[in-house]
Amino acid sequence: MDKISNYINGELNTPISGDYLDNTNPATGEVYSQIPDSDERDVNLAVAAAEKAFVKWSVSPAEQRAKTMMRIADLIEKNLDKLAMAESVDNGKPLALAKSVDIPRAASNFRFFATAIMQFASESHIMEQSAINYTLRNPIGVAGCISPWNLPLYLFSWKITPALATGNCVVAKPSEITPMTAYLLAELCIEAGLPPGVLNIVHGYGHKVGAAISEHPKIPIITFTGSTKTGADISQKASPLFKKLHLEMGGKNPNIIFADCNYDDMLETTLQSSFANQGQICLCGSRIFIERPLYDKFKNDFIARTKDLKVGDPLSENSNLGAVVSQPHLEKILSYMALAQKEGGTILCGGNRVKVNGRCENGWFVEPTVIENLPYDCRTNQEEIFGPVVTLMPFDSEEEVLVQANSTQYGLAATIWTENLTRAHRLANLLQCGIIWINCWMLRDLRTPFGGMKNSGLGREGGVEALRFFTEPKNVCVKL
Ligand code: NAD
């Protein structure tokens, strides 16, 4: 059975405890590899290695750092098939999705920040006749990067690449539920000649490795993506140490559909924004608001299209949805379907676990599910389910839908479908979300600020926002 290693000081190593955790394939329910059950001792080693590496990496020319990162990007692309297969087996997502989205995006993350750092500039401010101020932007030190299971290599690389490009060294913790591609990335970093200690990857539980990163006095900056609950926990530990924090957390995103929308585009994209990656994307639009004149038509067409989706073996080209990530997560999703019914909701399609025959008979599959007749403020419509479950709600006016869309604790993303652009811009301005898509979904330009408001996030990733986050501004004032 495959045993995953930590990656500390440029080497693949066993955890100090000598203990391992089982890693399961969600499509078969079988344990297929083992991952280090690391603890704070491994984190201490990683921090020491990162501190040592920082001395040189932080002052190395940006061009040199960029070149190394480009080599890693090339290697990710060269190993596309292997990485995509590993991601699909580890996470349960369709292989085709891993191959077309997750892995190419990981390579893009490396390329994007390798080139962004070559263009990064800081400000200067002149006080006529008296002084010139200029701002230095220095790397901060050892950055802690903690990432989730839903887009494993995609988000892992999204967090570490701006940190590395700006000259920081990294102690990273991938999700213990999907550790495999981060481990394979470590092998590629060695092959690419990344200097030892610049990137360290410590595998294991959040309450051990993640907590040790949050509390470590020599990690002054942390970027985290995961649930709001964990974000609060990290914040509680890190804030008394005055760490710089960036948190990307949960969502319950509204998808607002007006009767005048481009119907075919909307229907096609709404299918994606509801069920892509089994609904396990923080940006999925799980609350669908439909203007009343369109409600019945949309409902009928959407149900028909949802029923056509095939749930099955992630390795099969015919599967639109693969397995959800774990048994506890499957149970959570099913419990929300039961709750929806208890709250008076009607399940229009789906609502059940799926038994897939053959090698996947013990896997964790669930039907894409559409629910209606629920008030906007019930628990099903307020809490993050993070599965292939959406609710439909009719609305009569812009004012009404705005109140309902903004009613949750979250504020990550919203989608608006209308051909009335004045209305679209008006709503975009009033929706309490960090990301608004008008007549599209998941169109990502890596230069744009990415992140949520309210309990969905603190700070922004992407482009210059990330480069600024990972650097310390220092003003220098020169008297003229
Ligand atoms: P999670 O919070 O359980 O885990 C995320 C990471 O934090 C994992 O690596 C985990 O081991 C670690 N962790 C857990 N407990 C910790 C602790 N006490 N201290 C430090 N680290 C700890 O989240 P998840 O279940 O892996 O991911 C799903 C969640 O992530 C959903 O809420 C989803 O909305 C969110 N998410 C948000 C975004 C975004 O951009 N806003 C993107 C993807 C996922």
Image (cartoon, rainbow, N blue to C red):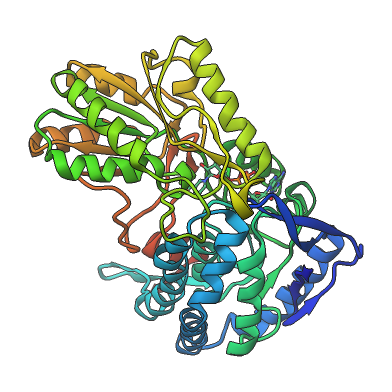
Q: Nearer the viewer, residue 75 or 24?
A: 24
Q: Is residue 220 left or right of residue 203?
A: left
Q: Nearer the viewer, residue 282 or 374?
A: 374
Can I make out residue 434 in this image?
Answer: no
Q: Is residue 292 left or right of residue 234?
A: left
Task: Report the label total.
Answer: 0
Residue displayed at 43% across by 63% down: 96
Q: Nearer the viewer, residue 167 or 398?
A: 398
Q: Position of residue 391 (x, y in %)?
A: 38, 25
Q: Position of residue 290 (x, y in %)?
A: 23, 25
Q: Quadrant of residue 228?
A: top right
Q: Is residue 140 above or below residue 257?
A: below
Residue displayed at 77% across by 46% down: 207
Q: Position of residue 422 (x, y in %)?
A: 8, 36
Q: Quadrant of residue 51?
A: bottom right
Can I make out residue 106 in this image?
Answer: yes
Q: Tell me the quarter of the image containing the N terminus.
A: bottom right
Residue displayed at 53% across by 54% down: 313
Q: Nearer the viewer, residue 111 or 343?
A: 343
Q: Residue furthest right?
A: 17
Q: Is residue 235 above or below residue 146?
A: above
Q: Tell me the quarter of the image containing the C terminus.
A: bottom left
Q: Position of residue 382 (x, y in %)?
A: 47, 23
